[in-house]
């Protein structure tokens, strides 16, 4: 099963998705997670590939202005930044909610004994 | 992450040690985003995992398969892998960015090895690719420890009753790579052909290598 070609087409205009002989190449599990979530959100019709390409271009422009190495190693960092911005703009996940959730997950990770899944329920400060 | 350091030396929380830094800043961001999108019903985690599964067989397991095939075919490399798996694997150009320590565990007729950990970051993805969904599931880990033979049976692996099963719990610091037994009937096979027999699951210990006869039959097909 190949992902729809249109995600490659959309990204190609901005910065091509790194691919190997068999498809996209990820250097860490979170990269694949970010990639897959983007495809699913698009499938649900929550944004268009044109909007995605704009968000990705903007994320890369900002990173380069901030001195990004621009050697491909940070590709999915830009991808994730673009996704975070786009879902905030669309009102799907506001930036402050994201920041709060990160903090809760980090507390949960620290409070979880090894070998058990890190669950938000394990956040010692709890959730509202 | 600042603040980590002082905390790490706190005596009261030594039992939390293994998860210190288990989530990288990027892991944390992706998890936070997914968690909110799932909660609001925009994303179905099973659907995301399914999409990832379609890639993970392409991403990394071939690296691990080459390590195993070389261990089967090349006695000098086998000894190197036994003595210091981290160094041996790095020598093939597969380098982890997290400084994890790799240990190879060897299946024999007497002992079968199986690896567990529910944390996706406790997975040797530089050699095995992205962790399969079941590996991250809570039932897999608890059941793998309590009833490894039952879990193996569900994966379609039936071992002789006299074979002991040893379950290894990965940590953020130590990752295990199972070296399955070289299948019978593969004398003289090239490393490349041998690597084709090595499945991802056989390197986690929840599977066995492909049967050489079935692979040869498939390759002689159209």
Image: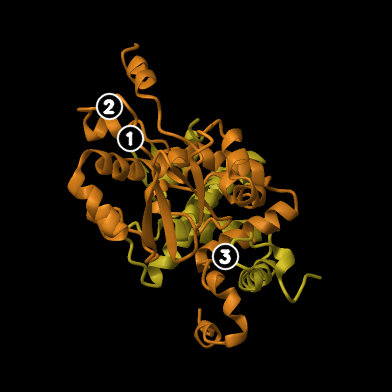
State whether residue A65 is above or below residue B189.
below
Nearer to us in this view, A4 or A103: A103
Q: Secondary structure at mark 3?
A: helix
Callout 2: chain: B
Q: Residues within 10 Å of mark 1 (few under 14, many from 20)?
A: many
CA separation in Å, label 3 and label 1: 39 Å
The chain to which mark 3 is attached is: B
Identify the secondary structure beneath mark 1. loop
What subunit carries mark 1? B
Question: Which of A52 and B54 lies nearest the eye of the viewer?
Answer: B54
Residue B3 at least partly seen: yes
- For the residue pair A124 and A28, the one nearer the viewer reads as A124
Q: Quadrant of the C terminus of chain A?
A: bottom right
Q: Quadrant of residue B221?
A: top left
Query: Which residue bears the numbered disc 1?
Result: B182
Q: Identify which residue is drawn at 31% across, 13% down.
A: B220
- Give the letter of the orange chain: B
Asked whether the viewer can see residue A9, the reply is no
* Residue A67 pos. (x, y %): 36, 71
Distance from the alpha carbon under mark 1 to that under mark 2? 8 Å
Q: Tell me which residue sits at (68%, 45%) in the image.
A: B44
Residue at the location (56% across, 49% down)? A51
Q: Which residue is mark 2?
A: B186
Q: Position of residue A25 (x, y in %)?
A: 39, 46
- The yellow-coloured chain is labelled A
Q: Establish whether labels 2 and 3 are both on one chain.
A: yes
Which badge, 3 or 1, comes first in the chain's sequence?
A: 3
Dot 2 lies on which element? loop
- Which mark is drawn over residue B28? 3
Q: CA distance from mark 2 to mark 3?
A: 45 Å
Residues behind callouts 1 and 2 on a single chain: yes
């Amino acid at each position: 099963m190949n992902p729809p070609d249109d995600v490659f087409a959309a990204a190609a205009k901005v910065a091509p998705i790194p691919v190997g002989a068999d498809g996209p190449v990820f250097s860490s599990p979170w990269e694949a997670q970010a990639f897959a979530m983007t495809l699913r959100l698009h499938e649900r019709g929550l944004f268009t590939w044109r909007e995605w390409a704009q968000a990705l271009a903007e994320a890369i422009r900002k990173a380069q202005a901030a001195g990004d190495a621009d050697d491909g190693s940070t590709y999915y960092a830009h991808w994730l930044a673009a996704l975070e911005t786009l879902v905030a703009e669309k009102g799907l996940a506001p930036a402050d909610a994201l920041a709060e959730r990160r903090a809760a997950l980090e507390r949960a990770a620290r409070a979880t004994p090894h070998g058990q899944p890190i669950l938000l329920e394990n956040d010692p400060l709890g959730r509202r | 992450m600042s603040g980590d350091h002082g905390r790490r030396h706190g005596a009261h929380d030594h039992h939390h040690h293994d998860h210190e830094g288990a989530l990288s800043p990027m892991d944390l961001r992706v998890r936070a985003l997914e968690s909110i999108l799932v909660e609001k019903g925009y994303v179905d985690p099973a659907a995301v995992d399914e999409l990832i599964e379609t890639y993970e067989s392409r991403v990394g397991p071939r690296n691990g398969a080459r390590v195993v095939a070389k261990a089967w075919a090349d006695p000098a490399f086998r000894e190197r892998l036994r003595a210091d798996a981290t160094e041996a694997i790095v020598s093939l150009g597969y380098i982890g960015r997290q400084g994890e320590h790799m240990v190879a565990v060897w299946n024999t007729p007497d002992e079968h090895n199986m690896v567990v950990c529910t944390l996706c970051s406790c997975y040797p993805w530089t050699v095995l690719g992205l962790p399969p969904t079941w590996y991250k599931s809570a039932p897999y880990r608890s059941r793998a420890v309590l009833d490894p033979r039952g879990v193996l049976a569900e994966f379609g692996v039936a071992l002789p009753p006299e074979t002991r099963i040893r379950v290894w719990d990965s940590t953020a610091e130590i990752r295990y790579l199972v070296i399955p037994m070289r299948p019978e009937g593969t004398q003289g096979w090239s490393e490349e052909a041998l690597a084709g027999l090595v499945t991802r699951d056989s390197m986690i210990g929840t599977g066995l290598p492909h049967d050489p006869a079935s692979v040869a039959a498939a390759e002689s097909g159209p």
